[in-house]
Image (cartoon, helix red, strand yellow):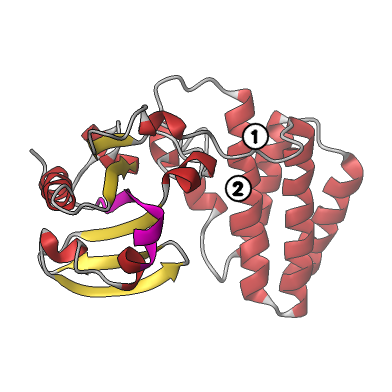
């Protein structure tokens, strides 16, 4: 058994001794897809507790240390913490009531432990995150193009960091969305909450040339050129915005 799965089992055994804990759910690579666990994985989970007990679980980590000493932790959300166990396992967790769990979007959870008097499939409470209001090729294509346009203006103004974010992050996010909508990848495990996860396994460099689209802080012009060419090779790009982007690229040469 992977040591992270063993840690969850140990934590579940400790929670079972407490009268106010209801369930422990593994998420992400500790969920139903736990075959993805490797030495670089962190451990994500939900602890479901009785309503009156929630403040205690949030304020104290004594229950967390029931499985292993905690070397470092901090509150990163009103419902939870990030923590590093003394043996190097990094965790992120949320403490929830049953009502809160039912309202929260999540997928791929695995019930590690559930108190006998708690009925129902708690993992089945999950639902996918709400998608964008307009999830279309037209939207993502034009958002990518205008990200390039705005980013190049920022670069010309001398705001290179924000330019890089528009060109090498926001526009690339839209490229990934376009691939999601226009290609069939039945075998890849997309993360509905973070589309950039495992994208390298889903698309080869000849399909998604990330090294050229994300070359770094000092190469916004080169990145924008690659992404514009990529979009024009695959989609019907409006010539007005394409010409406007090329004028900005020309200005950067000077």
Q: Position of residue 220 (x, y in %)?
A: 63, 64
Q: Nearer the viewer, residue 129 or 51?
A: 51
Q: Label for residue 173? A: 2
Q: Give left or right: position of 100 versus 65.
A: right
Q: Nearer the viewer, residue 236 or 197?
A: 197
Q: Quadrant of the C terminus?
A: bottom right
Q: Is residue 159 above or below residue 124?
A: below
The quadrant in which residue 200 appears is top left
Q: Label for residue 178? A: 1
At 42% from the left and 28% from the top, the residue drawn is: 124
At numbered mark 2, what does the secondary structure look like: helix, strand or loop?
helix
Start-end of magenta stretch: 41-55
At 31% from the left and 35% from the top, the residue drawn is: 118
Categorize mark 1 by other alpha carbons within 10 Å: few (<14), some (14-19), many (20+).
many
Categorize mark 2 by other alpha carbons within 10 Å: few (<14), some (14-19), many (20+).
some
Q: Nearer the viewer, residue 174 or 244?
A: 174
Q: Position of residue 105 (x, y in %)?
A: 52, 41
Q: Is residue 223 above or below residue 186?
A: below
Q: Earlier in the sequence, mark 1 or mark 2?
A: 2
Q: Is residue 133 magenta?
A: no
At 37% from the left and 56% from the top, the residue drawn is: 95
Q: Residue furthest right?
A: 240
At numbered mark 1, what does the secondary structure look like: helix, strand or loop?
helix
Q: Position of residue 193 (x, y in %)?
A: 51, 44
As measured in the structure, the alpha-carbon distance from the residue carrying label 1 to the one carrying label 2 is 9 Å
Q: Quadrant of the N terminus?
A: top left
Q: Give left or right: position of 194 versus 82.
A: right
């Amino acid at each position: 058994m992977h040591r992270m799965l063993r840690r969850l089992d140990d934590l579940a055994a400790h929670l079972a001794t407490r009268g106010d804990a209801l369930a422990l759910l593994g998420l992400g690579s500790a969920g139903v897809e736990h075959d993805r666990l490797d030495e670089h994985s962190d451990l994500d989970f939900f602890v479901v507790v009785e309503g009156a007990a929630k403040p205690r679980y949030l304020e104290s980590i004594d229950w967390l240390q029931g499985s292993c000493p905690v070397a470092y932790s901090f509150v990163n959300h009103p419902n939870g913490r990030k923590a590093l166990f003394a043996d190097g396992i990094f965790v992120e967790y949320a403490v929830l009531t049953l009502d809160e769990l039912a309202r929260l979007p999540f997928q791929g959870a695995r019930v590690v432990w559930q108190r006998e008097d708690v009925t129902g499939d708690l993992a089945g409470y999950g639902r996918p995150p709400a998608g964008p209001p307009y999830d279309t090729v037209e939207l993502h294509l034009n958002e990518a193009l205008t990200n390039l346009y705005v980013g190049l203006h920022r670069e010309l103004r001398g705001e290179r960091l924000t330019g890089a974010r528009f060109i090498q992050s926001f526009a690339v996010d839209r490229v990934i969305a376009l691939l999601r909508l226009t290609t069939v990848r039945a075998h890849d495990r997309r993360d509905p909450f973070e589309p950039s996860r495992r994208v390298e396994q889903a698309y080869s460099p000849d399909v998604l040339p990330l090294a050229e689209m994300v070359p770094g802080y000092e190469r916004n012009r080169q990145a924008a050129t690659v992404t514009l060419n990529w979009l024009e090779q695959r989609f019907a790009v409006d010539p007005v915005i394409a010409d406007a982007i090329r004028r900005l690229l020309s200005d950067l040469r000077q």
